[in-house]
Image (cartoon, coloured by chain):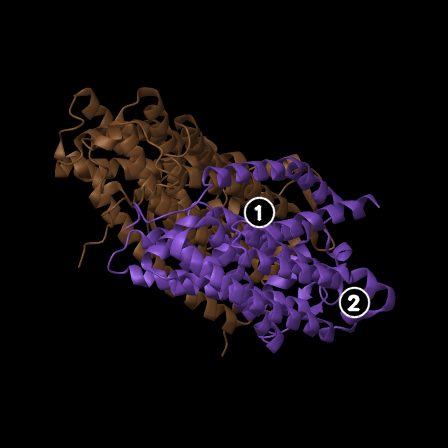
Amino acid sequence: MDLDPLLLSRIQFAFVISFHILFPSFTVGLACWIAVLEARWLITGKALYRSLSEFWTRIFAISFGMGVVSGIVMTYQFGTNWSRWSDIVGNVLGPLIQYEVVTAFFLEAAFLGILLFGRDRVPRGIHFLAAVLVATGTVLSSFWILSANSWMHTPAGAELRDGRFFVTDWWAVVFNPSFPYRLAHMLTAMFLTTGFVVAGISAFYLLRNRFLEHARVGLSMSLALITILAPLQIFLGDLHGLNTLEHQPAKIAAMEGHWEGGARAPLILFAIPDNEAETNHAEIAIPALSSLILTHEWDGVVPGLKNFPVADRPNPEILFWTFRIMVAIGMIMLAVALIHLVQRVRGKLYSPHWFHKVLVGCMPLGFVAILAGWFTTEIGRQPWVVYGIIRTADAVTPALTGGAVLTSLIVFMVVYTIIYGAGTYYLFRLLTIGPARLNDEDLEIPAVVQGHQPKRPLSVPGESIEPAE
Amino acid sequence: MEGSLLTLAWVAIVGFAVFMYVLMDGFDLGIGILYPFAPSEEARDVMMNSVAPVWDFNETWLILGGAGLFAAFPIAYAIVLPAMYLPLLLMLIALIFRGVAFEFRFKARSSRHLWNKAFFLGSLLATFAQGVVLGSFIQGIEVEGRNFAGTMLDWLTPFSLFCGVALIAGYALLGSTWLIWRTIGILQDWCFRVARRLLIVVLVLVAAVSLWTPFLDASIAARWFSVPNILLLSPVPLMVGFLAFGLWRALDEGREALPFAFAMGLFALSYLGLAISLWPVLIPPGITIWQAAAPPETQVFLLIGMAFLIPTILIYTAYSYWVFRGKVTGAIGYH
């Protein structure tokens, strides 16, 4: 059999990381949302906030669990499939990942236990602190992993000696040139993703005429967040794009679908890029607009793919489209923000059904945008693993056989289908069941310590979420 | 010399992380191994609840061990992981099923038995895979330059499979003594009985592994059985005997916390024995810790952070365990 371990490892990595990214995308924002709800519960003492927090904590627990187990797989992939990469960049990136583990993972894992099971065992203030620390952990985790990833796009502060990187300046490594843009863009994307899920669920409850008080709070807060973040994200995306133009011009050329580049480059709205013919088919373009957007001048010179050797070009047939999907979703998000403002000013935020239906439909948008954005940035880095220095083909494990990777790839695909199928089913069941009703007496009475029993908020008596047979 | 001290510090940190993992995930994996044999479904609820708040945290030590190895000894990471490709795949898949079983089991009704099986098989296979990885690591890895040069099936030997079985018994012993400490009634009585049988099995298996290991490598045999060493190192097996006797007595006397402490002691000694066998080799048979160490600038950058962060982690771990202290009883709230 002629199986290419490099290609299969790339497919496996893309598959595993695409699955994994969906969970942090959601849980980073959700952890912060839960911390906000806990703060409002602590300050106001209103049962509504506690019940909302408990509802979203259940959702968080399942998503976080799936994120953790798919994340462990990532750490080991680096060594099993990309051992040359581990050896070449280990001195630089190893510490960043280690710092992620000791500053973020332990914090999340330890205080998640208290957040989930400790409400009746610790004072309210400590429980709130646990929510804050879990949220802090998720944000710190994003900080370190994006620093490591950014370094592979814009390596700095290290030099290559005898085929391995040695660090000369840690500050330059951690705060490498693309890191601030990538971090800001990603965190905003994560908060937007969570915002759209919360808004969609709240709108769903309003449409169904259920949990109206919960739904109004969720809708109002999430739409306010979206209205601030959606325009901010477009601005951050533009800055990130300019940074990419400076450091990874070939990626920009592929994203824009430019073959020739040069001054007064058009903004291509639609095209079918063709690598073989080195041209676009069925192109629809606005003259000079790309130059204006990228250089902020009509006559600005932008790169074209033909400026680069064929072996150093990323694939425009994919990037052109993934980039446009991300941008289109950004525009839809901006439109939602604007409609929300109009509805709020008119005082009709909680009544117009068509807008709520739109919001339900928008729930997956953040996830799709994040996937499309990651495809754009990661496929755009190819054929390099460390941009301009180490090729992906030189990063793979030499002793790896195609058969071994094919085995693991198939196993991951089957297992993920089962696990994430079941997880999604349980998530949807939880969403349908909704938060605890507010007339529940135990919500109004301060928590009583019930023996030394870790009270599991996920599963109070008779609350199995599967229908009984 | 400065660099050498740094490297020693890193051996200590990575060694500590791996040891913490073995102890902490060891007992919760052990609970999964004992799970299907528990006296009742209520007992299973209690078993799962006794570790539900902490298992996720315990497993994080595995990531710290992996990340620490990658950061401080990247070459070891690049050689050992490809050599263990298939057993590590098995371990990861098993840990995935086991991890989600904690969340999913309590949400399921008609499919609960499936998540029970996922929890048991996940724990069993993850443990077996870890034992296999340990065994094949001890027997040595074929290296060429800075790369693993063997085949994808080099790990598959009678010794490594035997180590897999031995670790299953070891973790089950840890799990049963943890449950003696944290539960009461029928489940605790059952664990007293099980722990005694497991202790005998573990002693036989550990003795077998200890006698088998020197035959794998002449230098390991020389280390243990040459003349001054055999006297210097004899406290290790003697301590094992002492702890095993202490554990047996503690079980006889119905002591609750002591068996778990003795079981952890047995693990610590086995770990120490392994370290003595291999020192100062990091990747058997040929690569030492000094050859595998990351450069000083990397080790210093990390050490500064670790000096503050690891004690902090230990403090809030202790707090978290303290919050969930005491007996886990009944099944109120868990149906």
SS under mark 2 = helix
| Residue in the foreground of this view, choosing between B234 and B143 | B234
Q: Which mark is residue B224?
A: 2
Residue A60, percent from left and from top: 36, 42
**Total numbered labels:** 2
Identify by letter the chain in purple: B
Mark 2, residues whose alpha carbon is within 10 Å: few (<14), some, or many (≥20)? some
Q: Which residue is mark 1?
A: A152
How dense is the environment of label 1, judged by Cα within 10 Å: few (below 14), some, or many (20 and up)?
many
The C terminus of chain A lies in which quarter of the figure?
bottom left
Q: Colour of chain A?
A: brown
Q: Residue furthest right?
A: B228
Find the residue positioned furthest to the bottom: A1
Where in the figure is residue B331, as x and y percent of width and height? 32, 49
What residue do we see at 25% from left, 56% from top? B109
Q: Amino acid at mark 1?
A: Met
Chain identity of mark 1? A
Identify which residue, A396 or B189, lies in the foreground.
B189
Q: Between tags 2 and 1, which lies in front?
A: 2
User: Along the horizontal axis of the image, is A208 left or right of B59?
Assistant: left
Give me the residue at 61% from left, 67% from top. Answer: B203
Q: Is residue A186 above or below residue B123?
A: above
Q: Amino acid type of disc 2?
A: Trp
